[in-house]
Image: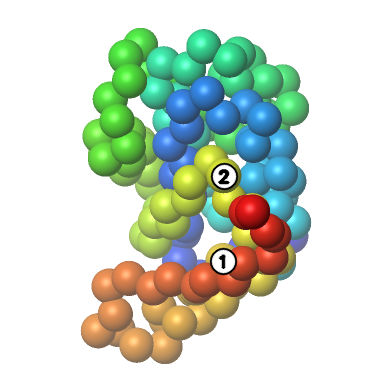
Amino acid sequence: MVVTGPKVSVIIVNYNGQHLLGELFDSLAKQTRPADQVIMVDNASVDNNVKYVQAHFNWVKVIASKVNTGYAEGNNIGLANASGDYIGLLNSDTAVDACWLAELIKILDADESLTQATLQRFARSFV
């Protein structure tokens, strides 16, 4: 698929979330408009998720921090390594709709005064 428009980087900060990552990265792989770059910043997890992601989702750029820097600093590390015109931030416990990124780009491109956008859909029960 040839991707046109702005370059998009998606950043995920993760800590011991290997059991969640398959669903997240599978949903990103099914995007109607895929991200140009997906970065996972791992905050010194001990659940072997760095090797898991490298083995199963080799299109994800993995940055393995030696210490847990926390969520905000993890995103800053991801941002420092991102090359996108637009940046998407996701938590490791999310899975996105196939049109998630295309819809966000459409919203942002429609109004140059916007600096951020969010789409919320809850498809699974957290109870």
Is 21 situated above or below 65?
A: below
Kind of element beneath mark 2: loop
Classify mark 1: helix, strand or loop.
helix
Please indicate whether residue 44 sits to the left or right of residue 3 in the image.
left
Determine whether label 2 and label 1 are within 8 Å by CB. no
Separation of residues labelled 2 and 1 (CA atoms):
17 Å
Residue at the front extreme, as displayed: 127
Q: Is residue 96 above or below residue 118?
A: above
The amino acid beneath tag 1 is Leu
Q: Residue 47 placed where, x, y %?
A: 58, 15
Q: Residues within 10 Å of mark 1 (few under 14, many from 20)?
A: many
For disc 2, the marked residue is 93
Q: Is residue 98 visible?
A: yes
Q: Quadrant of residue 23?
A: top right
Residue shown at 33%/20% (left/top)?
Answer: 68
Q: Which residue is mark 1?
A: 101
